[in-house]
Amino acid sequence: MSPQDDASRPRRDDRGRRDDRPRRDERGRRDGRSRREDRGRDEHGRGEHPRHGRDAQGRERSGSRGQGGPRRGWSSSRPSERSRTATGSRQVAYEALAAVREDDAYANLVLPRLLRRHRLSGRDAAFATELFYGSLRARGRLDAILAACIDRGLDEVDGDVLDVMRLGAYQLVDMSVAPHAATSETVALARSAVGAGAASFVNAVLRRVGERTAEEWIAQVAPDREQDPAGHLAVVHSHPTWVVRALTDALAGHGRDRAEIDALLDAQNQAPAVSLVMRPGLTDLDEMIDNGAGRGHLSIFAATWPSGDPGGMDPVKEGRAAVQDEGSQLMALALGLGADELVLAEQDGHARWLDLCAGPGGKTALLGGLTPGSDAELLAIEVQPHRTELVDRAVATLQEAGCEITTRTADGTTIGREMPEHFSRVLADVPCSGLGALRRRPESRWRRSPGDIGQLAALQRDLLGSALDAAAPGGVVAYVTCSPHLAETRLVVTDVLRRREDVEQLDARPAVAAGIHPELQDQVDLGPGPSVQLWPHVHGTDAMFIALLRKRSGQSPQNPSGSEEGPLS
């Protein structure tokens, strides 16, 4: 087809529809219009201003009334063409969402990198952080609202476009952003990120979203609570339905009231405070306060940071302090401090400690900082080499200070056979679903499925069995997860206890309390025991679980009954 034939064909817009509107020139003017606006302009298209800041038609330019002040002139673009580029904060939130979706990136790692790359700080960084994390947490609810505004399934919408619409919907429904600003800025983001055609689609959908309040949308899209309680809560609190059911069962299984599920889900949607851990012997609360931090809530080694990234403070830069949830601190302290009276294998003075699944190294560093007080040496193993490198970085300052910490890439499921009955204390902080850390890792709720739990539970049993094999008679093993799911916590411990004759479970509550400020120990509810399950809505920490098991002396690990029962389902 010749160019002439192509030019004679009816024009079509970016959606393939016929476009019979009059042609416009490069300035957006209709062909054939009078060129009177060119009168009074120079060869660069700039207007001549003969007197009093007015053009040839007597129009007054903006800024001219200030007699020589800054002058903006007239916009050379049509209104529909303005605001084509997204603001930096929205662009960062979009790029972070895309990284989480496309690359399985961790939210808490990808966002700081993007903030630094785009050089955002202060209010812009805070806005980007709220928009990104909020959109991740609210994804389930946002998708339900967007589905009601679109005439096809969300699975038919391009992922990039869907990310943009989630950001816009979150601003309209959950943030105090003016509707016109939320819509126009998100449309600008769509133009720059996914194209003009998608921007028109995004604009139409967001206008529909903005027609109702959050309460009105919930009433429309959430199932009735009486008929479908889990489905209703899944929309209201933006969790997968299976997670709502699992957490409801976990509350009951750990001795709490099922009615607390609303408070638990709500707490998991709140942005957590930034908790810091002070490496034992390397810094103290006075120095932390001098650097802008405050005292922690529960842990005796905790400090709090008001907001933002604490990486610029000296103790953090120098490895003498680090970001760590207080619940995680209490788990390490329960074994490193609280188990002193429970360990019987150190009476001969040989204190060998093992961190079975050490990466990324937070608990390892806290345990390592406690080794001088117990004249102990710590071996930290991690199956993934890159995570071993993270452990190395976490403990480097402590090693320089003289703590006996050795790191090694090794398989925790086989260490019990390789080094049987060798360690007096073993931390088995096993891989888990992460359902207890959804405040900090909101993407986890959308990545996990019920099928993951069974696979994880099998690995957790193997790791706990290996930890017990590696423990010396009289040694104590701390089994720890950052999930309250019953299949990852109580059922794993119960099954291992049923299969082994050489293990007894200890009351973990006094050991956990040993890491809490003394004046608060009697006020903190640590449950009915013997294990301890922390909760975001009760303790203000991640939902950490710990069970303490002690190796008996002179006992065979096998159940004498010879039972061949399988794992609990």
Image (cartoon, rainbow, N blue to C red):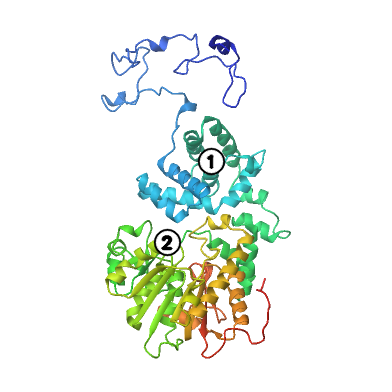
Residue under label 2, please give it.
Answer: 385
Tell me: 198 left or right of 337: right
Q: Hey, which residue is sitting farthest right in the picture?
A: 227
In the structure shown, which secondary structural element does the residue marked by tag 1 occupy? helix
The residue shown at (55%, 39%) is: 161
Residue under label 1, please give it.
Answer: 160
The residue shown at (34%, 26%) is: 72
Tell me: 367 left or right of 132: left
Q: Nearer the viewer, residue 425 or 307?
A: 425
> Spatial distance from mark 1 to mark 2, Cα to Cα?
33 Å
Q: Nearer the viewer, residue 231 or 530?
A: 530
Q: Within 10 angstroms of label 2, few (less than 14), some, or many (20 or more) residues?
A: some
| Residue 345, placed above or below residue 488 | below
Disc 1 residue type (three-letter): Asp
x then y, percent, for residue 168: 52, 42
| Residue 89, placed above or below residue 12 | below
In the structure shown, which secondary structural element does the residue marked by tag 2 occupy? helix
x then y, percent, for residue 206: 57, 39
The residue shown at (35%, 25%) is: 62
Disc 2 residue type (three-letter): Pro
Q: Nearer the viewer, residue 406 or 517?
A: 406
